[in-house]
Image (cartoon, rainbow, N blue to C red):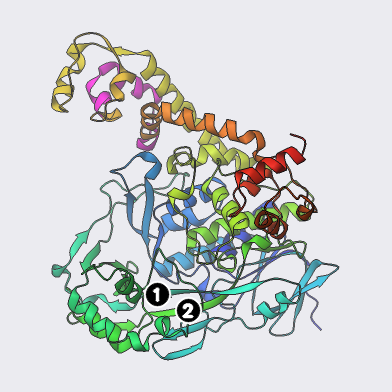
Amino acid sequence: MIRFPKYDIIVVGAGHAGCEAAAAAANLGSKVLLITMNMMNMAQMSCNPSIGGIAKGQIVREIDALGGYTGIVADRTTIQFRMLNKSKGPAMWSPRTQNDRVRFSEEWRTQLELLKNIDFWQDIVQDILVKNQKVIGVRTGLGIEFMTKAVVLSNGTFLNGIIHIGERQFSGGRLGESSSIGLTENLKKFGFESNRMKTGTPPRVDGRSLDFSKMEEQKGDENPEQFSFLERASGKIQKSCWLTYTSPEVHEVLRKGFSRSPLFSGRISGRGPRYCPSIEDKIERFSTKDHHQLFIEPEGWNTIEYYVNGFSSSLPEEIQFEALHKTPGFKKARFFRPGYAIEYDYFSPYQLTSTLETKLVENLFFAGQINGTTGYEEAAAQGLMAGINAHLKIKMQPAFILSRSQAYIGVLIDDLITKGTDEPYRMFTSRAEYRLLLRQDNADERLTRLSNAIGLASSKRLKIVSEKYKKIHKIIEFVKKESVLPEEINSVLEKKETQVINQKFKISNLLLRPQLSIFDLINGIKSFSSFIDTLGNLKEEELKEAEIRLKYEGYINKEHEIVLKLSKFEHLPLQMNLNYHKLSSLSMESREKLSKIKPRTIGQASRISGVSPADISVLIVFLGR
């Protein structure tokens, strides 16, 4: 009989969550076994071939600042970069890339195989082995038992996955891949509660058969940035995406298939994402709209395959194809595969602590879609945090927890464990109370030092951050201290159609004008330009960040004040075994919710739906505060 080594941590599933979890734990020094059903599909982009977007781009920057890999892999496989929401304030700016789907997965596998602390095993995990309410190993479909100190489950959409296309349904975690059977039932034996969710994906089409002259071209940024804060040569060659629209004629064709839709017939019981509905759901819910946007996205550098973003569907394939053929640019479209819906098991995240460890079984962690989230970025963030905390737990070191004022990742996890979710959870900027503090540009300043302190972010990375912010602070000091004469700057002000000055004026006050950028002032003020030259090798991103801090200083300071004010009770601890039913001054709903979720702090308790400010006051009085 083969004797397998005992591992520090076993990660189940090599999607975006599993890859980040395995990498984090291995880089921290744990011996990791990554078990996946298919070694060829690591970090597979099951849906759209892109990374980032609104709020999601901020998460990727945070993952990178902490020492994760998603940003690096995205940069190395980018075919287009865009900074979204540039017309709005900097709190809303969000980086997004189109990526080469095949190369993205290959690059992730390459990065993992470079880590000496990771072993791989291709198999399915059917049982979690538990002794005295503590995880001790896993049993695979081949009957092999691997012993371990901790387990991270990141099973994606594979737990009892069922694929729906029209009136047909069949088992699968992705089209062409089998689902994971047995693990849900195994976990229920330990008291875990599970439910069903639904997600979907659009058809894939042959780009050679599309008429792009009938569509609107969407190019990447002229000067593309990158996700990772580390040095990298940024290429400017990019592939375009395309925009087209549905029409009343298209909608009429789709309605013909509604009677055969699993979504409307009740064959799908799981909740789907409200913010990213299927095309049939859009037509039903927004019946007054006569058209919807479709983004046509290339799948890679060297492929003819295109992704029809906005046309997710589980309608019969002949209905999907007929409707798309009536869409501008798709008259002669040839299809690779139809869209489909997938229904799968998830476990309500209120069963987790803030480290993503389960409350019922010690040293068992959940990350990704198993927690009811959707999106590569949300999954990767959870995987990173689960991998970090699994390592710290078995090494008996303090947990690594990010607050809502420190990171979008902190918002994500806090929302999940305090509010739960009955629909696929997706991050939005509106979910963060302090989004001006949690900008995509300053993730490295917020998080790299914290990660370096636990041994994950490298010293090289920390040095880059330190040098970057020394330069930024010098720029801010100069701008606040130096003034400019009218004859130096008035020509620039006239060109920018803003009021000229008639006396000496602080550069910082000029920069507050919305018509002026820091680059306008550098080009127009010789002393400013000379000062910038003395800093040497200054990057555009460093100048942009200095500008943000100067323009929005008042708002940023106000948010910092609010954080300090609210933090007075935010971290006030609550005992896990506190009997809320004995606190008669609490509302009945509050007693039930607090008893079920068992928040660790007053801050977490305050964000539980159904717990009122009056209930929080009762708790604070009870704690003697």
Q: Toward the viewer: 8 or 411?
A: 411
Disc 2 versus disc 1: distance between alpha carbons? 8 Å
Q: Which residues are magenta?
A: 520-543
For label 2, count other residues whose C-alpha is less than 10 Å away and answer few (under 14), some (14-19) or many (20+).
Answer: many
Outermost top residue: 503
Disc nearer the start of the sequence (2/1): 1
Circle 1 residue: 201
* Residue type pointed to by label 2: Ile
Question: In the orientation shown, which residue stands out farthest toward the right?
Answer: 132
Pointers 2 and 1 in contact (CB under 8 A)?
yes
Looking at the rendering, which quadrant does residue 132 occupy? bottom right
Residue displayed at 28% across by 57% down: 238
| The disc label shown at residue 513, or none | none
The percent position of residue 588, horizontal first and vertical second, equals 68, 56
- In the drawing, what numbered circle is on residue 342? 2
Q: Is residue 619 visible?
A: yes
- Kindly report the secondary structure that dominates the magenta region of the rendered protein: helix
